[in-house]
Amino acid sequence: MSDVIIGPDGKPRCAWAGTGDSPLVRYHDKVWGTRTYDESALFEALTLGVFQAGLSWEIVFGKRDAFQKLFHGFDVAAVARMTSRDVESVSKWGQGLPYSTTHRQSNACLEALSCCSA
């Protein structure tokens, strides 16, 4: 399988994005590989990447809206103020993911932000 495919619109895309008009294709075209210095966009990429570890990108991307809600729209300052109770809530949210996985991954995201609350 090639790493690049040509969509029906003639645009080259990474094979993981697929073809057609789907949220994943729109994400690929508008977000993936786009340079950004926006703190929220960078935190979103970090969060989705951390939760993607060991899972397929499609599973994690399918929960993107839920992650956005749980992590306060990826507002770094708001997430840095989350309490251990908030983290526990995120950890329990898993929706079919093993508790220990979501707990570790939630903590990893929050530890990455610890510098923001200092």
Image: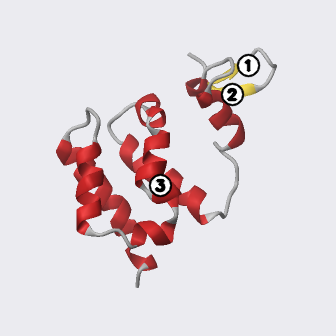
Q: Which residue is most to the left? A: 100
Q: Which residue is most to the right? A: 10
Q: Position of residue 118 (x, y in %)?
A: 40, 85
Q: Is residue 104 visible?
A: no
Q: Disc 3 on helix, strand or loop?
A: helix
Q: Which quarter of the rendered picture does the N terminus lie within?
A: top right
- Per the image, the residue denoted by label 1 is 6
**Mark 3 or mark 2, which has the lower sequence index?**
2
Q: Amino acid at mark 3?
A: Leu
Q: Are marks 1 and 2 in contact (CB under 8 Å)?
A: yes
- Per the image, the residue denoted by label 2 is 13
Looking at this view, is 31 or 76 the one in front?
76
Q: Is residue 114 left or right of residue 93?
A: right
Q: Amino acid at mark 2?
A: Arg
- Per the image, the residue denoted by label 3 is 46
The image shows residue 106, relative to residue 84, as above or below, that is above
**Rendering colour mode:** secondary structure
The image shows residue 64, relative to residue 84, as above or below, that is above
Q: Position of residue 77 (x, y in %)?
A: 48, 72
The quadrant in which residue 98 appears is: top left
Q: Is residue 102 visible?
A: yes
**Mark 1 or mark 3, which has the lower sequence index?**
1
Q: Position of residue 89 (x, y in %)?
A: 26, 54
Q: CA distance from mark 1 to mark 2?
A: 6 Å
Q: Are marks 3 and 2 in contact (CB under 8 Å)?
A: no
Q: Are marks 1 and 3 in contact (CB under 8 Å)?
A: no
| Total marks placed | 3
**Mark 1 or mark 2, which has the lower sequence index?**
1
